[in-house]
Image (spheres, rainbow, N blue to C red):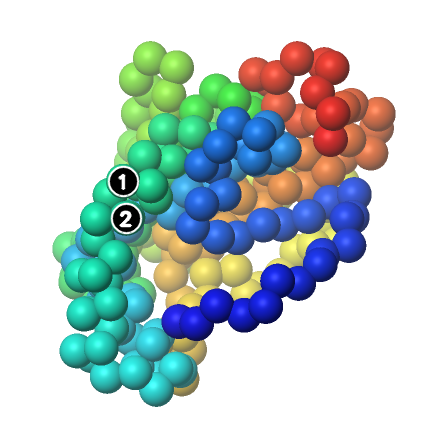
Amino acid sequence: GTFAAAEYVRPAQFTIVEGLLGFHSLAMRDNYDVRVFLDPPEDLRRKWKVQRDCSRRGYTTDQVLDELDRREADAEAYIRPQRRHADMVISFMPGDRGDPEHLDARIVMRPGIVHPELSPVIEGGADGISLVARGAESSLWVRGTISPARSAAIEEAVWDRMHFASHLRTERLGEFTVGTALHRSEPLAITQLLVLYHLVTARAAIALGAEHARSDLAPSRTL
């Protein structure tokens, strides 16, 4: 990629920020109500980047891989350590079927924010989804083979917990493209909905007068 000129972004009450170094400093981290880190296995991340940069940006496979190799030391030193500051660490990984529509998903949920209570609807890990608690963290595992009906039931349980945002319901959760072909992933749909849950509940908390939506910051925090 190339660096463009700096661009002023007018402050808004609610802002979504995407980038490689969003949690690098404490000053930056304290300005987030929700922190999400995408953490796929390195071989899958490289595959995704090759697909995107070759199909949409005109690079060759060798060019993309050479650039990734050149930046590996920086990734290890500055990007991956940010995982420990995230409220949700999301990993997609090859599942039993080995195709992009059936990747497994693991969502590590940490106590900096209040996550939806899903254990009553997961029922001990049957039917392609399980919840494992370890200390203050919990990990939601969604198998790529989960059935659409089971996925829909989990999604409905999450929607029930944010009934105030029913106007945001969409059938496009879980859709993704490979090249120009449209696909659907049930684990992706569940993952996207959990991220959406935190965004809308954080917004609701602030709209109702809270200074922030986090449980690990003092009330005196300045937004």
Which residue position is annotated with label 1? 77
Q: CA distance from mark 1 to mark 2?
A: 5 Å
> Helix or strand or loop: what does disc 2 sit on?
helix
Residue 78 vs 152, above or below: the answer is above
- Asked whether 113 or 18 is in front, the reply is 18
Tell me, for residue 109, which label it has, or none: none
Q: Few, some or many C-alpha atoms within 10 Å of disc 2 (few <14, some 14-19, many ≥20)? A: few
In this orientation, does residue 163 appear? no
* Residue contact between numbered discs 1 and 2, judged by CB atoms under 8 Å: yes
- Asked whether 143 or 181 is in front, the reply is 181
* Residue drawn at the location 46% of the way across and 61% of the way down: 174
In the rendered image, the quadrant that contains the C terminus is top right
* Residue drawn at the location 48% of the way across and 20% of the way down: 111
Q: Few, some or many C-alpha atoms within 10 Å of disc 1 (few <14, some 14-19, many ≥20)? A: few
Disc 2 residue type (three-letter): Asp
Residue 64 in picture, x, y percent from top left: 24, 73
Tell me, for residue 74, which label it has, or none: 2
Residue 205 vs 186, above or below: the answer is above
* Residue drawn at the location 30% of the way across and 83% of the way down: 59
